[in-house]
Image (tube, grey):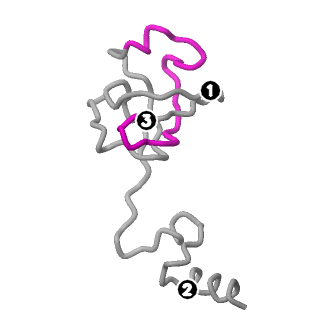
Amino acid sequence: MQLELFDDIKVGDIVRIMTKSVYYVLNDATNPRGTDGEVININNNGFITVKWDNGYSNTYSDFDLEIQKQLPEIPSNVCSCEMRKVVNFGCECEAGQAELKRERE
């Protein structure tokens, strides 16, 4: 698999620890080798928090991880609340406007 850069990793992506990572050698519950995990946070310093399929989580640099599966890009003409099934009150979509109207009543 091709090396993925930090800019490519997003919250929701599925990743694994790269074989070249120092964490790969550890192979413990918080650094499981050959296991998929979901990116749950990327902080302002670029550290990536992954929740592993075994329930544990840990934080890594971009060069420690390789992407297994990415979330699809949301087209700019499609509202994120429609794509992700959440309501964004600032949105102009029908669902967002209906929810905002209910909140104001």
The secondary structure type at the circle numbered 2 is helix
Left or right: 95 as drawn, with respect to 18 = right
Q: Residue furthest front?
A: 45
Instruction: State which region is magenta.
Output: 22-48
Residue toward you, 101 or 4: 101
Report the amino acid beneath label 1: Tyr
Q: Position of residue 36 (x, y in %)?
A: 52, 30
Gap in angstroms between the C-alphas marked 3 and 1: 14 Å
> Are dots 3 and 2 in contact, CB under 8 Å?
no
Where is residue 54 drawn, in percent x and y? 64, 26
Q: Could you classify mark 1 by the number of other residues whose Cα lies within 10 Å: few (under 14), some (14-19), or many (20 or more)?
A: few
Q: Which residue corresponds to the image point at 29% horizontal and 44% vertical from the top-left?
A: 7
Q: Quadrant of residue 29?
A: top right
Residue bearing mark 1? 56
Where, by quadrant of the figure, is residue 19 drawn? top left
Q: Amino acid at mark 2?
A: Glu
Look at the numbered disc 1 and give the secondary structure of its residue: loop
Mark whose residue sits in front, 2 or 1: 1
Marks 1 and 3: in contact by CB < 8 Å? no
Instruction: State the separation of the CA atoms marked 2 and 1.
Output: 39 Å
**In the depicted view, which residue is nearer to us: 28 or 78?**
28
Residue ID at (34%, 71%): 76
The label on residue 80 is none
Q: Farthest right residue?
A: 105
Q: Residue at 52% across / 42% down in the picture?
A: 40
Is 24 one of the magenta-colored residues?
yes
Q: Are discs 2 and 1 less than 8 Å apart at CB?
A: no
Residue 58 on the magenta segment: no
